[in-house]
Amino acid sequence: EAGVVQSPRYKIIEKKQPVAFWCNPISGHNTLYWYLQNLGQGPELLIRYENEEAVDDSQLPKDRFSAERLKGVDSTLKIQPAELGDSAVYLCASSFATGGDLGEQFFGPGTRLTVL
Amino acid sequence: SQQGEEDPQALSIQEGENATMNCSYKTSINNLQWYRQNSGRGLVHLILIRSNEREKHSGRLRVTLDTSKKSSSLLITASRAADTASYFCATDAFRDDKIIFGKGTRLHILP
């Protein structure tokens, strides 16, 4: 079974440029997460989807970040425009959540973003 | 904000010794999970313990949960070089259904 797929693995852009990350979750997983991870820190949730619905986007900086999960499967996370402080690893994860239990999360390898 | 706080922040032990990491949290939880992250890689789920459980085992891993103290511990027995990684606890908060990760413990196994 394929794991969570993310692309690209690495991205280097200049500040003020747009950037997009793509995630394909594990087949059958209804819940998808985007996290931001800074060096030496734990992942911080940006947004959580249950199927197509964004059920928790309270930590997403909505002035420059946007996300979508079309048809409740793949998801994209976009930053426009990028700032120097956005340099980090962006992780996607998925799980099968039932009855309020979010369950075990499976993580992709992440996209390492460097903003110059 | 990060609810889970791992302790210690870093730990170096000799191969073959046991490693113990602790996690403290602030609010009531549905469950608590431990993850491992090798350098430059994504996180790998190790074990999930529910709020009504006190101890759980998986291979060389033993996790305990004390909800009265709002704390959990992860014990790795007979450590190996491959156990070198960062270990994170993640709490699934009861009230607002959020999963929050701690800052992690960086474990280094010395040959």
Image (cartoon, coloured by chain):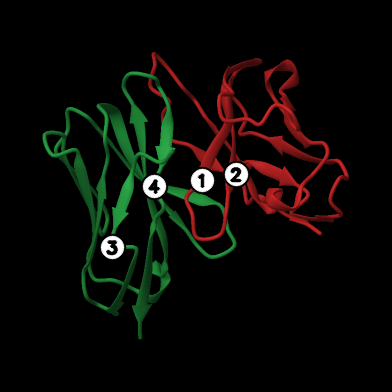
Chain coloured red: A
Pointer 1: what residue?
A: A43
Could you tell me the amino acid type at mark 3?
Pro
Secondary structure type for disc 2: strand
Could you tell me the amino acid type at mark 1?
Pro
Distance from disc 4 to disc 3, alpha carbons, whole Å, reads 12 Å
Could you tell me the amino acid type at mark 2?
Leu
For residue B63, side relative to residue A40 (left or right): left
Quarter of the picture containing the N terminus of chain A is top right
Residue furthest left in the image? B68
Task: Please tell me in which quadrant of the rendered image residue B96 appears.
Answer: top left
Q: Nearer the viewer, residue A116 or A88?
A: A116
Which x, y percent locates residue A13? Answer: 85, 54
For residue B47, side relative to residue A37 (left or right): left
Q: Nearer the viewer, residue A15 or A44?
A: A15
Distance from disc 4 to disc 2, alpha carbons, whole Å, reads 13 Å
Pointer 4: what residue?
A: B102
- Colour of chain B, in one word, is green
Q: Are discs 4 and 2 located on one and the same chain?
A: no
Q: Chain of mark 3?
A: B
Which x, y percent locates residue B24? Answer: 25, 45
Pointer 2: what residue?
A: A36
Q: Residue at x 20, y 43 (%)?
A: B71
